[in-house]
């Protein structure tokens, strides 16, 4: 099952096999199921991730060694095919004495997809004496190529070596490896200051000295951010003052939209502006003063919102987005 090609690779079909009760399944039906899912994964890999070494596959070998060791790891080729080397491998150094000039001979150690006609195949006997392949080893092929033979994207370069006298003249050089770019996963943490325990202070207009809002500093050190995250904040707690807590016994509302005034990896400053006005009361039947001047002018207002209204901050930080 294959479709049209783009950039040298076949696009997967837009349909998938489906089955029903009593259906007689053929080998082709089952193979199509595997092929569709695999081809879509390869498309995802090559379009969204690219190709190169994603994990491990370090190459080691000392000067004078006749073998190199490749660590376990994972890579993708330019067609999105998974190259998984679960147990690592060892490989003999190419058996060459020297180059035409008597000097070193360069070689590229590569990882590539093993085609079906090269793969280790397991067979099984079927009905009526039929024998068929039931499993192909999908392990990649590790091998040597000269720089001129290297097929970019199909041969994933692990290291280059210099050989003379059938031995390494220097340790393997990984400088030419293409490292698969991995998008960072954002780190998210959240928390809240304590209700009836958050300390507030007044924010004054620099020109007039009039109180225009409240401020608090939030400790986010427990989140362990390594860099300053993008913070979002929410003001929690009651809003309406009534009874003895209200100025002159007249009910009023204290409220504002908080914003982050200063941010660091382990702390942030939150300001709540308190604009004056009126706001609808219960069921909209009455209106109440919003942030009345006499309340804001009272030096006890920061303690009032802490002890009476329980104002506190819920926050969330996103690092690396």
Image: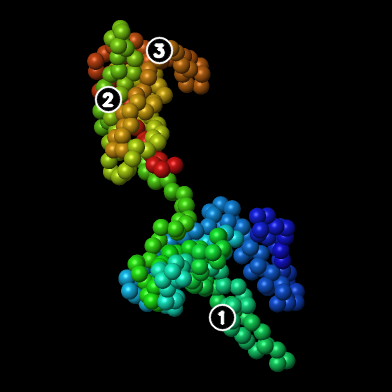
Residue 152 locus on image (x, y percent): 55, 60
For the N terminus, the quadrant is bottom right
Residue toward you, 135 or 272: 135
Q: Earlier in the sequence, mark 3 or mark 2?
A: 2
Q: Which mark is residue 193?
A: none
Q: Secondary structure at mark 2?
A: loop
Distance in Å between CA atoms under marks 2 and 1: 71 Å
Residue at image position (65%, 59%) is: 9
Residue 174 locus on image (x, y percent): 40, 61
Q: Earlier in the sequence, mark 1 or mark 3?
A: 1
Residue at image position (36%, 12%) is: 292
Residue toward you, 256 or 295: 256
Q: Which residue is mark 3?
A: 276
Indicate whether 153 appears above or below 222.
below
Q: Secondary structure at mark 1?
A: loop
Q: Which mark is residue 120?
A: 1
Give residue 225's quadrant in the image: top left
Please identify, in this view, whether the residue under mark 2 or under mark 1 is nearer the observer. Answer: 1
**Position of 37 compared to 283: left or right?**
right
Residue at image position (41%, 58%) is: 175
How many circles with numbers are drawn on the protein? Answer: 3
Q: Earlier in the sequence, mark 2 or mark 1?
A: 1
Residue 318 locus on image (x, y percent): 40, 40
Give residue 170's quadrant in the image: bottom left
Indicate whether 157 appears above or below 125.
above
Indicate whether 50 appears above or below 264.
below
Indicate whether 110 appears above or below 192.
below
Q: Which residue is mark 2?
A: 200
Distance in Å between CA atoms under marks 3 and 2: 19 Å
């Amino acid at each position: 099952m294959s479709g049209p090609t783009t950039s040298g690779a076949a696009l997967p079909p837009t349909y998938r096999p489906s089955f029903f009760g009593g259906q007689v399944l053929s080998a082709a039906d089952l193979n199509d199921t595997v092929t569709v899912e695999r081809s879509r994964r390869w498309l995802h890999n090559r379009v969204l991730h690219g190709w190169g070494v994603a994990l491990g596959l370090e190459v080691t070998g000392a000067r004078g060694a006749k073998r190199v060791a490749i660590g376990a790891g994972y890579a993708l080729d330019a067609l999105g095919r998974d190259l998984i080397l679960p147990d690592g491998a060892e490989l003999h150094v190419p058996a060459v004495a020297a180059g035409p000039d008597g000097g070193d001979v360069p070689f590229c150690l590569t990882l590539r997809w093993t085609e079906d006609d090269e793969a280790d195949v397991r067979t099984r006997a079927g009905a009526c004496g039929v024998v068929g392949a039931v499993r192909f080893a999908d392990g990649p092929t590790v091998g040597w190529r000269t720089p001129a033979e290297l097929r970019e994207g199909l041969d994933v370069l692990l290291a280059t070596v210099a050989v003379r006298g059938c031995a390494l003249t220097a340790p393997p050089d990984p400088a030419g490896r293409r490292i698969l770019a991995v998008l960072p996963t954002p780190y998210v943490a959240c928390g809240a200051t304590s209700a009836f325990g958050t300390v507030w202070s007044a924010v004054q207009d620099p020109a007039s000295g009039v109180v225009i809002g409240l401020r608090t500093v939030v400790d986010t050190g427990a989140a362990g951010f390594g860099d300053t995250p993008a913070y979002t904040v929410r003001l929690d707690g009651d809003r309406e003052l009534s009874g003895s807590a209200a100025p002159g016994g007249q009910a009023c509302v204290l409220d504002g939209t908080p914003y982050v005034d200063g941010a660091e990896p382990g702390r942030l400053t939150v300001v709540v502006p308190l604009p004056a006005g009126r706001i609808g009361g219960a069921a909209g039947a009455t209106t109440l003063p919003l942030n009345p001047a006499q309340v804001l002018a009272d030096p006890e207002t920061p303690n009032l919102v802490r002890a009476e209204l329980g104002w506190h901050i819920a926050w969330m930080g996103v690092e690396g987005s």
